[in-house]
Structure formats: C-alpha cells, structure tokens
Image (spheres, rainbow, N blue to C red):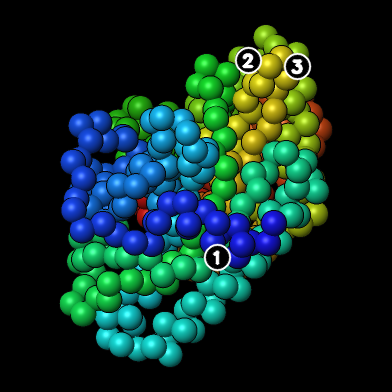
Amino acid sequence: MHMEQALRKEEAKTDIANPIKKPRELPADIPSSINPTLYKALWEILPEKNGATPLAKGGEHLVFEFVDPNKKSKHGNVVYKVNFLDSLDIVDAARRGKSKEVDRIVRSMETAMAAREGKLNEMRKYFGFSAVPVQYAAIKQLPVTPQIIEALKPRTKTEGLPKELPVWITVQRKVDLPPEDTHSINGYYPEANFKYKKGVHLAQAEEEYDAAHRTLTGPAQRFSGADRMLCLAIFPELKDVLVLAEADPSFRSKLEEFVHALIRYTQETGTSLDLAGHENVVITKKGEAWQLKMMDALFAREMRLSHLLPVIEKMRTDQAIDRFDFIYAVNILNTIRIANALAGMLGMPDRISMPGLAEIPAEKWRLALGSFLR
C-alpha cells in the first residue's frame, strides 16, 4: 500500500490531527516511561475517539497507541511515533512567522525521512525482513500547545506559537512482546556509571572500564574468564542474556546469528545502530522459536563509523572535544564495544575494528566522555 494512502486511512480511523474541545478525565495510572507533566499536556489535546493514548517518550520519539476496550476495531494494534526532536527545531521559526525557515526545516525532515526508509530496507537485507517492523512515514500538521513544548524542552519561548506544527509521524503495527520471553540486547553508556561511585568503588570502576575498553577495542583475541567479567562489569545489562544463551541452545543460536549480522552490517555499511536503549533490539519467543526484532535500532540522526575518526584525531592530538564530538563518540563507541563484548563472550571470532581507536588510552576516553555525563 502506498505510504500516503496508508496514512490517510489510519487518520480517518483515529482523527489524531483533530483535538477535542472537552478534555478527558486523566487516567490514574500514567506509564512510567513518560513524564506526568508531559503526559497531561498531551492528553488534553488528544481525541477521545478510538482511545488515543500516550505510551512512552524516548530520546527522539513520542509514542502513542490506540486502545479499543471493546476490541471491535484494529486500532489497538496501531502505534504512532512522533519525532519531536526535529519538530522542536521548527518552534522558534514558526512562532516568529519565518515561513521560509520552516520550509527549509521541513525539506530537511523529508530528506532525513527518505534516508531513514532506505536504511530500514538496508537493515532488512542483513537482519531479515521480519526483524525490522514495516513503517509508513509522512509529515503532517499536528496540534501543539505551549505546555507540550515546555515539557519537551524547558525554557523554550512559546509566545506566538501556532496551533499546529509540521511533524514527522510514523505509523506501524504494534508488536506484542511478552515480558517473560523477551530479552533486550543493549548496554547503557559505561561512562555514565562513574557519577554514582566514590572512593574505592570509583577507583575499581575506573580500573574495570579501562581494562574492558582495551579488550573491546584492541585486536581480536579469545576471551578469558577475566575478560568476560570485565565486559559484564561495564555492561551489566548483558548478564541475563549470556546466562540464557548458556542454558538455551536455540536462544544462543539466534543471538550468535544477530551478533554476526550486526558486525557484518556495521563494517560493510559503516552505520552504527543504537544499542543503548532498552528494547531497541530484542530477541523474543513466538511459539517454540526465538525471533529477532529491531524495534527502534536507528538513531534519529545518522551515526557512521567515519564520524568517530575526527574525534580520534582530536584525542590523539590532545584537543578538547565539543558536544557534537561527544554525541558521535559515546554512541559509536557503545555500539563497537557491545558488539565486540557479545562476540567475545560467545566465543565468536567476529569483531568491529576501527582505525586508530586502540591507540587512544582508555583513560582519555573515560575522562573526556564522562565529563559530559556527570
């Protein structure tokens, strides 16, 4: 089905673009994955018809679902993802009536949207068609209020804010993930761990980080028991995954298949996937078979291995890194180290290699990146 036709069909069902005049009663249970203030602001403009409900807020997206308690329609199987990150760039231009600037940002969003669709198709070639949910995306005018903007980005000026803004919206079928049989393949930035530690615990964490970083960015080698312990020290999220892989041969096979595809995809396309977020990538069980699902593995802005090269050069020559350097480095390094950690702990020879990366002392990365996360 053509993308525009699909979106028009879903809009006809949901009326998401038409805010109601009479606010609904706020639910008693607000999802923990979304700020209550933001939830309330969104709730006040959502149509009551078909049960449009805020579900979650991630780093770049607001996620909505459509709940049909009578189960008489298909709305309960649809989710909308609203890319608020790009839309926030429009706010200042829109409220000041800078239509040309708004048009420029919208064209940039359209270019990024087309590129993202190309990336999703590329991912399907490496990870399998069923692993990457089918999506339909377009830019639509959606209602907005100062309260929503303030909740998303505090201290943003909202005087003169129009009632609607062009928004990048994605529609996809909801994927049911049974909690007891769904395992997230992710690891959060190790550089963020230090702000909660002091004294001897901080010193131990720093020593573990440095040793693990050297192992995961250096030449491929067979992991010892100590190497495995270091990997789990900086990526504790992987512990349950590795325990299950040792107990369940079919799960291990699917995990190894994913790691092999991940390393091949990263090296051949130069694209870094987002493995920091919980359930961005999962292995879930359907019947007796384990399945890979890439729920939200692409960054909002493209991350390529080549983006790390200028940061490596700055580190090599003792230059200070800026915020953009940090964003590229912390995310790309995270992908490299998680992929290599999984491969090493599973006894696989595959590795992601990066020219010049191993030459930079681990302590330099720890101090430079950690300074942005404290």
The CA distance from mark 1 to mark 3 is 39 Å
Q: Secondary structure at mark 2?
A: helix
How many callouts does the rendering have?
3
Q: Residue at x 41, y 30 (%)?
A: 70
Of mark 3 and mark 2, the one earlier in the sequence is 2
The CA distance from mark 2 to mark 1 is 40 Å
At which x and y percent is residue 322? 44, 67
Residue sitting nearer the eye, 178 or 35:
178
Left or right of residue 60, residue 228 in this image: right
Left or right of residue 147, residue 245 in this image: right
Q: Amino acid at mark 3?
A: Ser
Q: Residue at x 76, y 43 (%)?
A: 129
Please rate how many residues cluster around mark 3, counting C-alpha atoms within 10 Å: few if below 14, some from 14 to 19, many from 20: some
At which x and y percent is residue 138? 55, 65
At which x and y percent is residue 239? 55, 21
Instruction: Look at the image and tell me in which quarter the N terminus lies.
Output: bottom right
Q: Residue at x 27, y 35 (%)?
A: 30
Q: Is residue 373 above or below residue 112?
A: above
Q: Is residue 278 visible?
A: no
The CA distance from mark 3 to mark 2 is 10 Å
Instruction: Please name which of the two marks, 3 or 2, marks the residue nearer to the observer.
Output: 3
Q: Which residue does the numbered mark 3 point to in the structure image? A: 250
Residue sitting nearer the eye, 324 or 30:
30
Q: Secondary structure at mark 1?
A: strand
Left or right of residue 118, residue 76 in this image: left
Q: Which residue does the numbered mark 1 point to in the structure image? A: 138
Q: Which residue does the numbered mark 2 point to in the structure image? A: 244
Q: Secondary structure at mark 3?
A: helix
Q: Amino acid at mark 2?
A: Leu
Determine which quarter of the picture holds residue 343.
top right
Q: Amino acid at mark 1?
A: Ala
Q: Are marks 1 and 3 in contact (CB under 8 Å)?
A: no
